[in-house]
Image: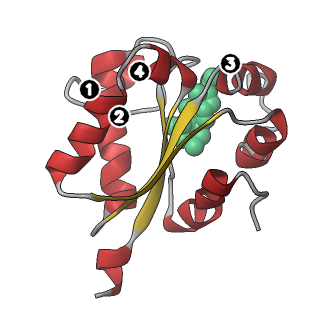
Amino acid sequence: MAELKERTFIAIKPDGVQRGIIGEIIKRFEMKGFKLVGMKMLQASEDLLMQHYIDLKDRPFFPTLINYMSSGPVVAMVWEGKGVVKTGRVMLGETNPAESKPGTIRGDFCIDVSKNIIHGSDSVESANKEISFLTGLPQT
Ligand code: UDP
Ligand code: MG
């Protein structure tokens, strides 16, 4: 039964919140059959975001990414269910909305990689680390 308890970290980014897409995103995950087990709206600090995106710290877009993610509140959520990490990524679409198929969240609601409205963990291991985002505490 262990796989039924799989969890992923999903965050609606500041542009998704500002554009009023919170309900639509929650609806898609609920209709799919996943269970919302935690949710918090918060203004992420630059320190928290730098920790969250630590693997990208040497990429040229890193400063822009931190500015974008701290430009307003985010909605941080934990979703649970069988295969939720992988299926969640499929529901999000590709990192670049231009490569995301219609029917995916990024494919339906955005056009720019630097404003792609939603985050989703890319592995169970990342999810376990990223879920600490809800507490605002550094990842362990
Ligand atoms: N990003 C960007 N430009 C790029 C690649 C990524 O602005 O060329 C941003 C984008 O917001 C993306 C985030 O950095 O969602 C994290 O990048 P990652 O490669 O982890 O993509 P994701 O896992 O979010 O699909
Ligand atoms: Mg990623």
* Secondary structure state at the residue bearing disc 2: loop
Q: Does the beta carbon at disc 4 come under 8 Å from ligand 1?
A: no
Residue at 80% from the left image edge and 40% from the top image edge: 50
Tell me where residue 40 appears, x and y as whole percent: 53, 46
* Secondary structure state at the residue bearing disc 1: loop
Q: Are marks 4 and 2 in contact (CB under 8 Å)?
A: yes
Label 4 to label 3: alpha-carbon separation: 20 Å
* Secondary structure state at the residue bearing disc 4: helix
- Report the residue marked by disc 3: 71
Q: Is residue 130 above or below residue 29?
A: below
Q: Are marks 4 and 3 in contact (CB under 8 Å)?
A: no
Q: Are marks 2 and 3 in contact (CB under 8 Å)?
A: no
Crowding at label 4, few (<14), some or many (≥20) Cα neighbours within 10 Å?
A: many
Crowding at label 3, few (<14), some or many (≥20) Cα neighbours within 10 Å?
A: some
Quarter assignment of residue 90: top left
Disc 1 residue type (three-letter) = Lys
- Report the residue marked by disc 2: 93
Tell me where residue 98 appears, x and y as whole percent: 39, 16
Label 1 to label 2: alpha-carbon separation: 7 Å
Q: Is residue 68 above or below residue 9?
A: above
Q: Nearer the viewer, mark 3 or mark 1?
A: 3
- Report the residue marked by disc 4: 97
Residue at 35% from the left image edge and 34% from the top image edge: 93
Disc 3 residue type (three-letter) = Ser
Tell me where residue 76 appears, x and y as whole percent: 52, 44
Q: Reading the chain from its start, which is encountered first: label 2 or label 3?
A: 3
- Report the residue marked by disc 1: 101
Label 3 to label 1: alpha-carbon separation: 27 Å
Label 2 to label 3: alpha-carbon separation: 23 Å
